[in-house]
């Protein structure tokens, strides 16, 4: 009997481990179903062992209490609680550093990313891909969120060299060496897509279904989307400098609109006498437009300088308040500056 037990433990140890990383925000009503679906799916893939890492990103509801309750029910679940809200990408970085799987799968906490189709991502990794992103034929997001996704796709393609045909999403899987390389990043502004793209080009898509949201609404407001896009632009917030950037954009737009108005006015009111000096309108249009563009460029340069300054001051990616879970007996989650 003792011999058989040793053989079973040896076989179990040789199994590949799948780590599921779930950033959590306002998900007290949805997280339990996601965890249950992961466990049900993995029970059918007996050739793998698995762990689940839930990172509470300073959620204002009872998400952390839900994670603690689930950690008592599922011994493969680890919970990490942030001291405040640091953003989805920071939560992903904390989960990646905590993971020990040969393959790491990141997914959402709202149930829209189907955990029961994780096998498709795992299969693509086993066939040789270094990273796999889920692609949705029909997304069940709001028009606002779909617009944000489209802008993020465009930005990633133009700014950080994402292949045009590659679709990136919050549901993806990566190999261990990719995770290890991503975890070396200690900058204050992590951008997970950029970290994957700079590590490997062996990235593929697999088609999965996308579900409608059952509870609540997306945590991505316009402000959060703008911050995400700025992260992608600079790859690494300084509010005054960002305000200068926005002011530059607004004045440039006003100058352009005023220029169009001037042209239309000259065409429509060609017979009327202009009480303003000749060329005044055109001159003001150019001055406002050029001034706005200059402020925009200075603001962007200031954004880079400001983020570099904050990174040099070792502003943490995240701060961990609490950790729960049986899987932590021999592990200690660390902040980025401790890695």
Image: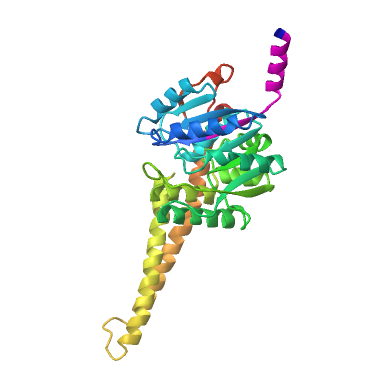
Please give left or right for residue 44 compared with residue 216 in the image. right
User: Is residue 319 positioned above or below 264 on the image?
Assistant: above
Q: Tell me if residue 319 can be seen.
A: yes
User: Is residue 293 positioned above or below 315 on the image?
Assistant: below
Please give left or right for residue 110 compared with residue 44 in the image. left
Quick one: quadrant of the N terminus?
Answer: top right
- Compare residues 244 and 197 and report the one nearer the observer: 197
Query: x, y (%) of residue 311?
Result: 52, 38
User: Is residue 258 positioned above or below 144 on the image?
Assistant: below
Mark count: 0
- Residue 14 falls within the magenta-colored stretch: yes
Query: x, y (%) of residue 8?
Result: 69, 17
Tell which residue pokes out farthest to the bottom in this image: 271
In terms of image quadrants, where is residue 110?
top left
Quick one: quadrant of the C terminus?
Answer: top right
Question: Which residues are the magenta region?
Answer: 3-21
The residue that appears at 64% across and 34% down in the rendered structure is: 103
- Compare residues 42 and 53 and report the one nearer the observer: 42
Query: x, y (%) of residue 315?
Result: 49, 34
User: Is residue 121 positioned above or below 50 on the image?
Assistant: below
- Compare residues 29 and 152 and report the one nearer the observer: 29
Colouring method of the image = rainbow
Please give left or right for residue 333 compared with residue 28 in the image. right
Query: x, y (%) of residue 3?
Result: 73, 10
Q: Tell me if residue 316 can be seen.
A: no
- Residue 200 falls within the magenta-colored stretch: no
Tell which residue pokes out farthest to the top in this image: 2
């Amino acid at each position: 009997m003792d011999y058989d037990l040793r053989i079973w433990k040896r076989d179990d140890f040789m199994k590949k481990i799948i780590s599921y990383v779930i950033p959590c925000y306002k998900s007290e009503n949805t997280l339990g179903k996601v965890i249950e679906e992961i466990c049900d799916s993995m029970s059918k893939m007996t050739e793998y062992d698995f762990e689940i890492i839930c990172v509470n990103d300073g959620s204002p509801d009872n998400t952390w209490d839900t994670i603690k309750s689930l950690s008592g029910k599922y011994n493969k679940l680890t919970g990490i609680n942030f001291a405040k809200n640091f953003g989805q990408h920071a939560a992903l970085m904390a989960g990646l550093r905590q993971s020990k799987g040969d393959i790491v799968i990141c997914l959402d906490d709202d149930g829209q990313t189907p955990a029961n189709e994780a096998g498709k991502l795992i299969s693509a990794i086993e066939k040789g891909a270094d990273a796999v992103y889920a692609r949705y034929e029909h997304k069940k997001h709001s028009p606002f969120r779909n617009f944000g996704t489209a802008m993020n796709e465009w930005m990633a393609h133009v700014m950080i060299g994402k292949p045009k045909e590659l679709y990136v999403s919050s549901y993806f899987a990566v190999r261990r060496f990719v995770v290890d390389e991503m975890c070396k990043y200690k900058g204050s502004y992590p951008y997970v897509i950029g970290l994957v793209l700079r590590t490997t080009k062996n990235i593929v898509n697999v088609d999965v279904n996308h579900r409608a949201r059952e509870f609540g609404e997306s945590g991505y407001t316009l402000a959060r989307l703008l911050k995400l896009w700025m992260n992608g632009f600079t790859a690494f917030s300084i509010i005054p400098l960002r305000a200068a950037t926005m002011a530059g954009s607004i004045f440039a737009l006003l100058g352009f609109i005023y220029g169009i108005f001037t042209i239309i006015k000259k065409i429509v009111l060609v017979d009327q006498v202009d009480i303003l000096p000749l060329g005044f309108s055109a001159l003001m249009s150019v001055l406002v437009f050029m001034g706005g563009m200059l402020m925009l460029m200075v603001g962007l340069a200031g954004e880079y300088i400001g983020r570099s300054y904050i990174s040099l001051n070792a502003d943490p990616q995240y701060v961990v308040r609490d950790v729960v879970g049986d899987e932590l007996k021999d592990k200690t989650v660390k902040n980025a500056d401790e890695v």
